[in-house]
Amino acid sequence: MKSLVDKLNRSNNFHSLTGNVSFAVFNAITFLVMARTLDKELFGQWILYVTAASLLNMLRVGLVGTGAIRSISLAGNEDQKAYIGSTYKLGLWTFAATAALFYPSFFILKIFYSESIYFPVLLFYPLLSLVILPYNQASIVTQARLQFARLSLMKTIHGISMLLLIGVYVYFFEVKLEVLLLLHAFSNFLPGIPALIFGWDGWRDVRFSTKKHIKELLRFGKYSTLISVGSSLLRSADTFILSMSAAMGATAIAVYAIPMKFVEAVEIPLRSFSATAYPKLSQAFGQGKEKFNEVLHSYNVATTLSILPVILILLVFSGPLLRFVGGSGYEDSLLLQKQVLYIILVYILLLPSDRYIGVALFALNKPVKNFYKTMMMLAANIIFDLIAVFYLQSLVAVALATLIFTLLGVFYGWFFVKKETGVRFLDMITNARRIINQSRYILTRKKN
């Protein structure tokens, strides 16, 4: 037992998975409380704000985070400090730019429009972008240095903070959107406190930042920013386009969010393993294409196999699980939620291949190819979403749009990776058989 504990303690995959699981559990409980407590209109406004905030945060992470993780993981000690300090400085600059743009925009638009569903984003996101900076920065540094135990701790604090602040507030008090968004900002600041105290976010290295390293990060970031924003839009375009429809609006957003919540649950192992895969693939590429393909196949197959039982559970118990998440307030749309969920299950099955193809292209230092892939998927998603929302007025069609653009992305991205490394799809099937046989052997040996 001690040997097992020691082995798990040294496993980056274990720590990454633990952090994502703990955050997902607390986040799911918070979501359940909100879905049962808030009316559909207010809940839809909350979903829209969180979606917009996630999109804007991805813009900043794309600008500095993706390139920084790769650069820090490959650099020597002195260069590491320069990259970390430069990343922090860019994070501060993006906060200043956001505040300078959003606050004047709010007061100007307020002259022409008394109310807008997007006003909370203009008012509260600049505050969120400042208080979340230590947490974001520490996530970049710990991931690049493969210090996933620290990252796991911060994610756990984040999840607990959201439940204690937001969950308790909406359950026991009369909810006002402004108070809710302030609590959301504070819950994103709390996980950054240990990062500030212990220096995990690298704030002490700001003095080592250089123009050379900033330019290098921005050179990589100009593509990764667009890719990150594009990837975020792929997940959030449904919400934004639904918000523009007078016929569907915030209520449709709330209904659609129920089955889509299960995607987050399935993404737990995917986020965990892709976080460790990126620096490992970057290092593997330096060891040769064969090693790179081996690492890519291992991660893709292992993650796909790990989510298969979850997909089966969601398929068999879709009704009770949807009732559990949405509560009695969404009983009238249960059949519609089931139809959406069945389509989303196929999308979930494709997620590992799509995610690892994107990670592989970054590790191969081919952000342009990844950019083409993401933009093609985004264009397809927006076109199909517009048809689904404004012509068909169907949430099922919105879910089908998600499946279609993911299929296009997987085939398109696989073509680029194959061109660079010669990776073969048949090798992935062989790898899957090997993992299944190994698992059978271990289970059989334990029984004997």
Image: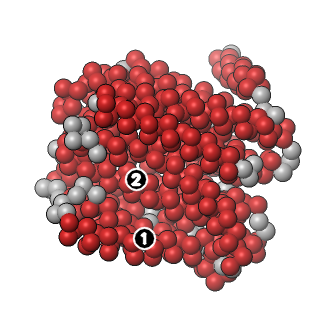
Give the answer, above or below, for where 350 lies relative to 45.
above
Q: Crowding at label 1, few (<14), some or many (≥20) Cα neighbours within 10 Å?
A: some
50 on left or right of 274: left
Per the rendering, the mark at residue 159 is 2
Q: What residue appears at the point 77 percent right and 65 percent down from the top-left corner?
A: 75
Quadrant (top left/top right/bottom left/bottom right) for the C terminus = top right
16 on left or right of 391: right
Q: Position of residue 124 (x, y in %)?
A: 31, 66
Element at label 2: helix
Quarter occupied by residue 187: bottom left
Q: Position of residue 56 (x, y in %)?
A: 44, 59
Q: What is the C-alpha distance between the residues marked 2 and 1?
A: 26 Å
Give the answer, above or below, for where 146 lies relative to 360.
below
335 on left or right of 386: left
Q: Crowding at label 2, few (<14), some or many (≥20) Cα neighbours within 10 Å?
A: many
Please tell me whether mark 2 or mark 1 is closer to you in this view. Answer: 1
420 on left or right of 406: right
Quadrant (top left/top right/bottom left/bottom right) for the N terminus = top right
The answer to whether residue 281 shows anywhere in this view is yes
Amino acid type shown at disc 1: Thr
Frontmost residue, 110 versus 333: 110
Per the rendering, the mark at residue 206 is none
Element at label 1: helix
Give the answer, above or below, for where 163 lies relative to 137.
above
Amino acid type shown at disc 2: Gly
Q: What residue appears at the point 57 percent right and 44 percent down from the top-left corner?
A: 374
The answer to whether residue 157 shows anywhere in this view is no
Quarter occupied by residue 253: top left
Give the answer, above or below, for where 73 lies relative to 88.
above
Q: Position of residue 363 (x, y in %)?
A: 72, 50
Q: Position of residue 416 (x, y in %)?
A: 72, 38
Per the rendering, the mark at residue 98 is 1
